[in-house]
Image (spheres, grey):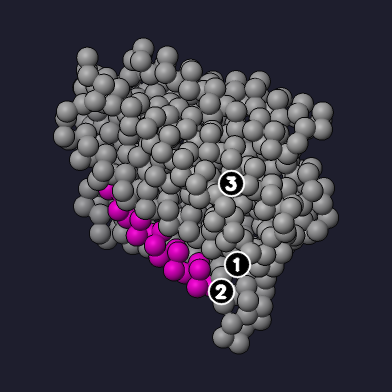
């Protein structure tokens, strides 16, 4: 039994897929980071308002991520069989679900932004700033969902570079417009956080245009046409709902967890809320490489299982565990070393926020080790390998029976903010004990494809 595979194809595929995805995530992070830094110069209320306003974006990303996950899991397995027609129908089904949800969420945000934000915080200044931001930024949701679904479609057939290109275009457009609209350059009025929101909307529209042109005119793997998006299959729709619902459900559970995190931490003073925003930004940066590699593992897993190569998949799974445990330890050490200079980039925040951010980043330097191992194992192997419902059940149990109760109790007892924050991250370590058992039983490898799914 080998713990490190000698199959060079695995490493070539991992690198070829991971680098573009990681770069895309890094560029996306850079866009959000630039937003935070520019808005940070407007003070704690603006930073907190944008952070709270983006909780709905987080909810959208989680739901959209569930749709993308369903596309990836099913399409990657059909890619292992080289069944392009089934892949096209899966993409069409996913797009319709994603666009419908994005339109519904946008309407809700336009109608009652302040009421939604009051769920997360009771600070009037934060609610006012967040509502101002949310009314505009929600117009980007529809375009975001189209782009992400199409990127997932391309990744499922091992085309990962287009996502990096799209994010690069978004970075240039968003940062440039942020500078112009937030601060009022080139004769335009200074719009503050409304300028940041408008810049996001425009950059999302540009992203979608680039992605649609690529899929329609450039891609040679699927040669997807508009007419393909109007076609469907009752059997594949049934499969998409059957296997997609646990993925979407898991993402919704996670989004509820993230929003509950914000609601719990939102009861602390503004300095704590600002510190949470800073710490989570650093967490996102640390997550970039891991997410890229984990996504690559998921594509390789889906393709290998779809092709029926189960013994080879066992060898890959052992290798993944070793690689991601090492990556977690390395990432935790980097967070510990770089937390002070990173926090120092936020020149406009208060000394209180700096102190809390330092404590929160210390917590992250430990929990990120577990995140790297269990997230890659449970998402990249177990879920992509076909045992989708297990990951959903596992996440649900930890969120509602461990994470949220422990944090609520800690906050009610007057525990310090860092301890409440640690409770909200404790599952990242605890899930590792579940992951190591589940992965090494190898009962998660399930071929989800049909011999004939085009009916």
Q: In this view, does 26 lie to the left or right of 44?
A: left
Q: Residue under circle 3?
A: 280
- Tell me, for residue 411, which label it has, or none: none
Seen from the viewer's position, the closer of residues 61 and 232 is: 61
> Can you give x and y, in whole percent of width and height, for residue 79 in the image?
25, 35
Q: In this view, does 339 lie to the left or right of 313?
A: right
- Numbered disc 1: secondary structure: helix
Residue 76 sits in quarter: top left
Indicate which disc, 3 or 1, sits on the residue closer to the N terminus: 1
Whether residues under marks 2 and 1 lie with C-beta atoms below 8 angstroms apart, the answer is yes
**241 up-or-down from 219: above or below:** above
> Can you give x and y, in whole percent of width and height, for residue 403 in the image?
65, 27
Q: Residue under circle 1?
A: 38
Tell me what residue is drawn at x 45 percent, y 63 percent: 170
Q: In which quarter of the image is the N terminus?
A: top left
| Residue span colored magenta | 159-177
- Tell me, for residue 179, which label it has, or none: 2
* Label 3: how many Cα within 10 Å (few below 14, some 14–19, many 20+): some
Q: Taken as a whole, is the magenta stretch helix, strand or loop?
A: helix
Disc 3 and disc 2: Cα gap in Å?
A: 23 Å
- Numbered disc 3: secondary structure: helix
> Can you give x and y, in whole percent of width and height, for residue 74 in the image?
35, 32
Indicate which disc, 3 or 2, sits on the residue closer to the N terminus: 2
Tell me what residue is drawn at x 43 percent, y 35 percent: 328
Is residue 34 visible to the viewer in this orientation of the structure?
yes
Seen from the viewer's position, the closer of residues 163 and 291 is: 291
Q: Is residue 361 left or right of residue 84?
A: right
**394 up-or-down from 101: above or below:** above
Q: Is residue 167 covered in magenta?
A: yes
| Front: mark 3 or 2 | 3
* Label 2: how many Cα within 10 Å (few below 14, some 14–19, many 20+): some
Seen from the viewer's position, the closer of residues 177 and 10 is: 10
């Amino acid at each position: 039994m080998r713990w490190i595979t000698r199959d060079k194809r695995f490493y070539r595929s991992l690198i070829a897929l991971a680098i573009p995805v990681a770069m895309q995530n890094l560029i996306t992070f850079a866009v959000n980071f630039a937003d935070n830094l520019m808005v940070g110069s407007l003070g704690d209320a603006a930073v907190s308002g944008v952070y709270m306003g983006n909780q709905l974006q987080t909810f959208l990303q989680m739901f959209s991520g569930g749709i993308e996950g369903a596309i990836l899991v099913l399409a990657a397995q059909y890619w292992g069989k080289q069944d392009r027609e089934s892949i096209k129908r899966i993409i069409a089904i996913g797009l319709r679900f994603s666009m419908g949800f994005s339109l519904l969420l946008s309407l809700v945000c336009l109608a009652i932004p302040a009421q939604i934000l009051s769920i997360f915080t009771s600070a009037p200044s934060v609610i006012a700033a967040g509502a101002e931001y949310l009314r505009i930024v929600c117009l980007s949701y529809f375009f975001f969902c189209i782009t992400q679904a199409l990127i997932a479609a391309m990744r499922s057939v091992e085309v990962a570079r287009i996502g990096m290109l799209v994010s690069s275009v978004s970075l240039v457009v968003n940062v440039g417009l942020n500078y112009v609209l937030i601060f009022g350059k080139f004769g335009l009025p200074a719009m503050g956080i409304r300028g940041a929101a408008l810049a996001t909307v425009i950059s999302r529209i540009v992203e979608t245009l680039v992605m649609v042109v690529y899929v329609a005119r450039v891609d040679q793997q699927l040669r997807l046409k508009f007419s393909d998006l109007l076609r469907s299959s009752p059997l594949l729709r049934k499969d998409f709902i059957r296997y997609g619902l646990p993925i979407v459900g898991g993402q919704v559970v996670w989004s509820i967890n993230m929003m509950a995190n914000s609601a719990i931490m939102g009861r602390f003073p503004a300095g704590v809320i600002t510190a949470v925003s800073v710490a989570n930004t650093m967490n996102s940066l640390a997550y970039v490489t891991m997410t890229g590699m984990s996504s690559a593992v998921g594509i390789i897993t889906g393709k290998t299982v779809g092709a029926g190569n189960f013994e080879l998949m066992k060898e890959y799974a052992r290798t993944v565990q070793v690689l991601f445990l090492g990556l977690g330890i390395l990432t935790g050490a980097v967070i510990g070393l770089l937390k002070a200079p990173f926090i120092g980039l936020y020149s406009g925040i208060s000394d209180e926020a700096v102190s809390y951010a330092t404590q929160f980043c210390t917590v992250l330097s430990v929990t990120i080790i577990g995140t790297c191992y269990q997230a890659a194992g449970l998402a990249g192997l177990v879920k992509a390998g076909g045992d989708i419902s297990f990951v959903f059940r596992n996440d649900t149990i930890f969120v509602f029976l461990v994470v949220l109760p422990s944090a609520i109790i800690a906050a009610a007892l007057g525990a310090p903010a860092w301890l409440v924050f640690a409770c909200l991250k404790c599952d990242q370590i605890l899930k590792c004990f579940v992951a190591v058992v589940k992965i090494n039983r190898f009962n998660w490898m399930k071929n989800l494809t049909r011999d004939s799914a085009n009916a």
